[in-house]
Image: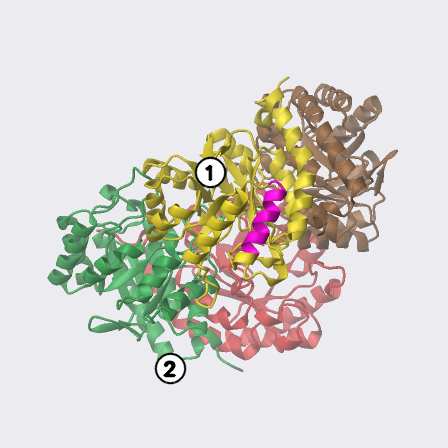
Chain colours: A brown, B yellow, C green, D red
Amino acid sequence: MVPVGNFGIGGGEFVVMAGPCAVESEAQLLQTAEAVAAAGARILRGGAYKPRSSPYAFQGLVVEGLKLLRKASQATGLAIITEVMSEDDVDLIAEYADIMQVGTRSMENYALLEALGGCDRPVLLKRGMTATLEELLRSAQVIAMAGNPQIILCERGIRTFETATRNTLDIAAVPVLKTVSHLPVIVDPSHAAGVRSLVPVLSRAAAVVGADGLLVEVHPTPENAMSDGNQSLTCGEFRSMMADLRPYIELQQESRQLCPQLLVAGGAD
Amino acid sequence: MVPVGNFGIGGGEFVVMAGPCAVESEAQLLQTAEAVAAAGARILRGGAYKPRSSPYAFQGLVVEGLKLLRKASQATGLAIITEVMSEDDVDLIAEYADIMQVGTRSMENYALLEALGGCDRPVLLKRGMTATLEELLRSAQVIAMAGNPQIILCERGIRTFETATRNTLDIAAVPVLKTVSHLPVIVDPSHAAGVRSLVPVLSRAAAVVGADGLLVEVHPTPENAMSDGNQSLTCGEFRSMMADLRPYIELQQESRQLCPQLLVAGGAD
Amino acid sequence: MVPVGNFGIGGGEFVVMAGPCAVESEAQLLQTAEAVAAAGARILRGGAYKPRSSPYAFQGLVVEGLKLLRKASQATGLAIITEVMSEDDVDLIAEYADIMQVGTRSMENYALLEALGGCDRPVLLKRGMTATLEELLRSAQVIAMAGNPQIILCERGIRTFETATRNTLDIAAVPVLKTVSHLPVIVDPSHAAGVRSLVPVLSRAAAVVGADGLLVEVHPTPENAMSDGNQSLTCGEFRSMMADLRPYIELQQESRQLCPQLLVAGGAD
Amino acid sequence: MVPVGNFGIGGGEFVVMAGPCAVESEAQLLQTAEAVAAAGARILRGGAYKPRSSPYAFQGLVVEGLKLLRKASQATGLAIITEVMSEDDVDLIAEYADIMQVGTRSMENYALLEALGGCDRPVLLKRGMTATLEELLRSAQVIAMAGNPQIILCERGIRTFETATRNTLDIAAVPVLKTVSHLPVIVDPSHAAGVRSLVPVLSRAAAVVGADGLLVEVHPTPENAMSDGNQSLTCGEFRSMMADLRPYIELQQESRQLCPQLLVAGGAD
């Protein structure tokens, strides 16, 4: 179990992290934070440093964004997860964030992984675009060997030939990772789907295969979002999804208690 | 809804098709048929004609296998699904089978698809190894335009770089296909997983995302199976899995009744 | 070496097969045949039976197309290669064709492969869309074990995430196949490229890595072609390409004579 | 054209960069440098900072390696290319290297790309493991917009399902990149092949499709190499390869002069 604030990830609770792709303004962030907290999320996500995949793209509010995240945390009690993209930013971001997120494009940025090994914050490590699970675990090992064993793995879909979804959610990754490692596994249905309509149904699948939680994009007005608007839920959709998920999570937790080995073993003759 | 015997696929019931990869003997088939019927399966699967991917591979019992399938059907009341690999075999197999299965390697065998268009049996069409959903639907359209609209789509995993599983189950394929077509969608967790331990958990995922049923490999003694032993459940494992699945299926059916658009729409603000 | 008419494929000569994707009319075929023969092609390609990937697509002139191919052969001395898509068509097509082509979508159509094993014509076997070379060789083995050892392998590009080309030409496939098998290897630059401007340069690459020849789409008026117009060379472009290729082919043949093991071994210290 | 020392890349000369994967010792490096210089290479490659894909892997000689590279450059007149993996190392490495190499795993490390934008050394940018050419050009644009237009693109094979080679060399990438950008394009046949026997033949292909040069792994005793031994040529093999390549390069250069548009245009009717 990876402790975060006064709770833990991987200890039995299904932990939902939600929030906008990018921190855009105080109003946007606080409104989202209040809505996701009320709906049952425990952690607020929001990017302050954005991948500059194009020189014209929005590059985030940087330190100003980190301060807004902290403010939203104080207002709602939510813990904070935000992405770190450079080893030079690790110390600064660690002052504001409860969990350090490593993005898909950084899964094999070894300089960054080593710097995070020297940090006392938990790290959420996203699977690379076409990385195998073995490669994901190898990157986790680099962080751990560099001194930080508090690692959370994140399945967010892999690149395939399918175009109906932005990526292909590898739902089997959850039980496979839970079998071969003791690390918590979180599912990001938003980047897998690429469209908001599929997020709730993929979240259900994540819940019943034993994921330890979700990382979900939520925005008060997705049509105005500076990034990932198509795959962001509105606050109301997020609330509906959380209500829909509850009985699936409970069912999964019961069956885990009754028969902990069932998840993967499938019972015996 | 595609009617099969006295029930239907795609009409609300979660229909499980189970049985061995290949029909090997009367004892093997009958024992499996009785076990899967008792556990709640409605359809018996079993290959009589096998893909000869190697000249040394087992090629199936052919007509003898078809007769055993019919006999097992009479003994248990199960309907029969079996694979057809050549347009020359369509008429013969249609005498014995209730559903004609088109395998992954045949998804773009247009001569076979057209021949099935002239057949009065439902067709279960498996997604090709790296086919997109659009390509799958295009093959379905070839069958439909040739005269047979009774088509069941089957997601069975796609080839990716991941090696922990035989294929990558594209769980999002189910809601995507249900949104863009009216055809029933079945999930084959056995070929997706490649190992039996993952079959129950992938089946749970299939159930909660709205699949209309499963196609599962079951063998009385998988260690002796002539093909696909690694991914075949024992009869006891299948029974456990069916018991485990029941509440997930019920939950999904309730939520579908309450809010039919929820599955994909995710609720509204 | 696979003998075709009075010459052979895989015996040292670089053999070019050229012609339209589909046989559309007598005028179109004869004009193309004369042009490609004059430019140095030895074999005329042309589809009489077309893959019906959509029920609305052009389905070929069938027997009429076969007769036109034979007529063009008589007029020009070119041998004929054409695709067979159903085991039921093998005997008929073998009456007209010198080489039976198995398309990408049929590489794992075992009923067809077995039927071709009983045929006395050479078979050109195209690599499947995402098939490994081992899988290609396994399909070749099915034909061979069924009685027909006259097999020509064809690399035509594989499906990757790259979209600038229709497929990704796996140029290394040529030396790999030549090392692990004794079968001739032909390159289809047209389906690999998907655009005509890349065909000459990919053909150069094929020539210098030791391919035994090419399979190229040529059409008198590509803008009017019923299929694959974008990737078809005009007759003039084909003539220019053949002239451009000559010195590369000669160079490669010289080096093969000087140092037969150089191709793959790279010399020794 | 990107100027390097007293010559240029992309200006008509076919420039070969060769050397070991990792700088291991003074003896190893100097012996290789002398051999590759004598055979016609213009640039010495060698890793001083190695990707730490495993915490147990060799991590390079770091600054000591950079000094050895400089020493080898002084002894032979070769320019130096070496990899930079962290933005924090850019300034230091730029003191020793003539070309800064960005590895496959770093193609989307935007912090690194931006830091290289502020550096006055040319940058060789390798294509990511499954990156499209558009994504490669987007990363190049990030470097250029940050101030450094001296960029050399490198095709080094992409990840596909084929296992006979380590990666699949996308030979069409060369003419595609030359058409849509003015940047020089280098081919790395060593990482594409993964086995030394294929390096000479892939180099031929690179030469004839218009690449501006090669990046090749050479080691005096590959069987003792600390990394990439399987794909490293011996010094003698490299010499043989360079001799074999010469006429192909000349032929390509002649045809480029005669008909500059032929490379891609394929001639006209």
Read off the chain for label 1: B
Read off the chain for label 2: C
Q: Quadrant of residue C217?
A: bottom left
Same-chain check, marks 2 and 1: no
From the top left corner, tell me how far across and down residue C221 is, in percent. Answer: 21, 46
Amino acid residing under circle 2: Leu
| Residue farthest to the top, as pictured | B269
Amino acid residing under circle 1: Ile
Q: Residue B152 carries which label?
A: 1
From the top left corner, tell me how far across and down residue B217 is, in percent. Answer: 57, 50
Q: Residue C258 carries which label?
A: 2
The residue positioned 80% from the left and 52% from the top of the image is A144
The one of D128 and D80 positioned closer to us in this rendering: D128
Q: What stretch is highlighted in magenta?
A: B28-40
Q: Which mark is residue C68?
A: none
From the top left corner, tell me how far across and down residue A220 is, in percent. Answer: 66, 20
The residue positioned 55% from the left and 33% from the top of the image is B175
